[in-house]
Amino acid sequence: MVRTVMAWPADEARRRQYMATVMSMHLAELEEAGANLPDPASGESWEDTIEAIEHAEDWHASVEQLGGWFAEAGGYRTVAAAPGFEAFTADMGSRLGDWFAAGLILALVRRMATHHRDLPGGASINKAVFILERVHLPMVPRNSHDLRRAWKTYKPVAHFCAALFDLFLEAMMMGKSPEESAVLIEEELNEEFLLFLSEAEAYLEFGLRYQPPRTKGQPLLPHDETWTFPEYRPWPNSPRKAAPLDGVLLRAAMEYRAPVPSA
C-alpha cells in the first residue's frame, strides 16, 4: 500500500489496480501452496496431525486476509483493467530518481534546520535545490527544473521518499552497486518495514512542523495534501537522528545566496 501511495499519490484508480494485481498474484501462489499442504488425516502421530492442522489454519487465514484486500481493491474487474505487473514495475522504476530528489530536498531542509540555523537565508527548498544541482548524487536529477518538478509531484509523500533514500545511501556506503543496492533495500523493507515507517514518520513530523523562511507561516509539508499515518502506530520512534551537513554538502550550502526580491 505504501508503494502505491508513493507512486501515484493523486491517482486512486491506479493504486487500486496495483493492489488488486499484487493480491491476485499472491492468491495464485497460495492456491498452488494449498495443494501441497499435508493432510491431517495422514499424520503418523498426534504431533503430525496438529502440525498439519496448524498449517491449514495459517493457509486459510492468509487466503482470507489477501482475499479481503483483493476485494477491497476491486477484484477481478480491477485486474482486468490494469496494465499488468511488469508494466507497474517498470513504471515504479522510472520514478526512482524523482523519489530520491523529493526525499533529499526534505532531508536537506531538515538537516539544515536542525544543525545549521546560522546559514544565510535559513533552511529552504531553494537552498536544497541549489545544493543538489551542485552535488551530483547517484540517480538524482541534476537541474533545477527537474528537481522542482519532482518536489511538486512527490511532496505529499516526500517523507517516504526520504526514508527510502536513507536505505539506498546505506547500501551505497557498503560498496554495493545500484543493482545490488536495490536487492538489499527490498530485503530491508521486507524484514524491517516498521523501522522504515518510523523513519518516514520522523521526516513527516518535521515537515508538518517546520515553516521555511518567507512562506508566511506555511509548513514545509501542507497538512491537507500530505499522506499521513493512521492513529494506530505499531512501531517505535526512529532511533536515527538527522546528521549535520559536511563536506561538499556544507560547502554548497554556504555558497548559496538568496535571490533579492524585486522592487
Image (cartoon, rainbow, N blue to C red):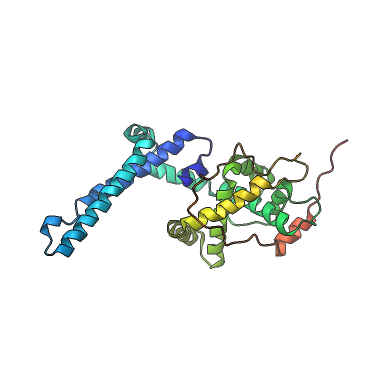
Q: Residue furthest bottom?
A: 174
The answer to whether one can see residue 103 in this image is: no
32 left or right of 177 in image: left
* Residue 169 place in picture, x, y as percent: 57, 60
27 left or right of 170 in image: left
* Residue 15 place in picture, x, y as percent: 45, 38
Closest to the observer: 183 or 190? 190
Closest to the observer: 260 or 218? 218
Residue at position x 11%, y 56% in the image: 41
Residue at position x 43%, y 46% in the image: 89
Quadrant housing the N terminus: top left
Residue 217 vs 110, above or below: the answer is above
169 left or right of 134 in image: left
Q: Residue furthest right?
A: 263
* Residue 165 place in picture, x, y as percent: 56, 55
- What number of labels is visible? 0
Quadrant housing the C terminus: top right
Quadrant of residue 81 in the image?
A: top left
Closest to the observer: 29 or 144? 29
* Residue 25 place in picture, x, y as percent: 32, 45
Residue at position x 74%, y 51% in the image: 123
Residue at position x 64%, y 43% in the image: 221
The answer to whether one can see residue 170 in this image is: yes
